[in-house]
Amino acid sequence: MKKLVLCSVAAAMIAGAATLVSAPAPASAGPSCADRAKLMHPYDKWSRKAYKQACKDRRDAWQDHRKAWKKARKRGVWIGY
């Protein structure tokens, strides 16, 4: 009886460890606009601010374009590119 319990506990621990090892890492987002601005312009505050604003504008424009594309696809309108 003790052997059976010991073996089942050991098997459960091994199986649990195997699932922890093989679990994929959570998806991490890329660096934010502020992080990229700090990397590109480490000593110039005004350049960082300008880069962050331009980056946010590009990101917003891309998201708006993506939403419009999804909406058009949902309606069945094909947009040629």
Image (cartoon, grey):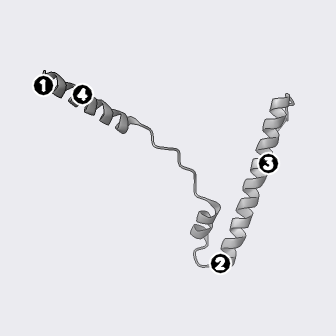
Q: State the CA–CA distance, disc 3 to disc 2.
A: 29 Å
Q: Give the amino acid at mark 3.
A: Asp
Q: Quadrant of residue 59?
A: bottom right
Q: Give the amino acid at mark 2.
A: Lys
Q: Under tag 1, what secondary structure?
A: helix
Q: Under tag 2, what secondary structure?
A: helix
Q: Give the amino acid at mark 4.
A: Ala
Q: Under tag 3, what secondary structure?
A: helix
Tell me which residue sits at (75%, 50%) in the image. Answer: 62
Q: In what quadrant of the picture does the C terminus appear? A: top right
* Mark 3, residue position: 64
Is 25 located above or below residue 73 in the figure? below
Tell me which residue sits at (81%, 32%) in the image. Answer: 73
* Mark 1, residue position: 2
* Mark 4, residue position: 11
Q: Under tag 4, what secondary structure?
A: helix
Q: Quadrant of residue 15?
A: top left
| Mark toward the start of the polypeptide (4 vs 3) | 4
Which mark is in front, 4 or 1? Answer: 1
Q: State the CA–CA distance, disc 4 to disc 3.
A: 52 Å
**How dense is the environment of label 4, judged by Cα within 10 Å: few (below 14), some, or many (20 and up)?**
few
Q: State the CA–CA distance, disc 4 to disc 2.
A: 57 Å
**How dense is the environment of label 1, judged by Cα within 10 Å: few (below 14), some, or many (20 and up)?**
few
Between 33 and 26, which is closer to the camera in this rendering?
A: 26
* Mark 2, residue position: 45
Q: Quadrant of residue 45?
A: bottom right
Between 20 and 80, which is closer to the camera in this rendering?
A: 20
Q: Verify CB contact (< 8 Å) between mark 1 and mark 2.
A: no
| Mark toward the start of the polypeptide (1 vs 2) | 1
Q: Is residue 62 left or right of residue 80?
A: left
**How dense is the environment of label 2, judged by Cα within 10 Å: few (below 14), some, or many (20 and up)?**
few
Residue 30 in picture, x, y percent from top left:
58, 53
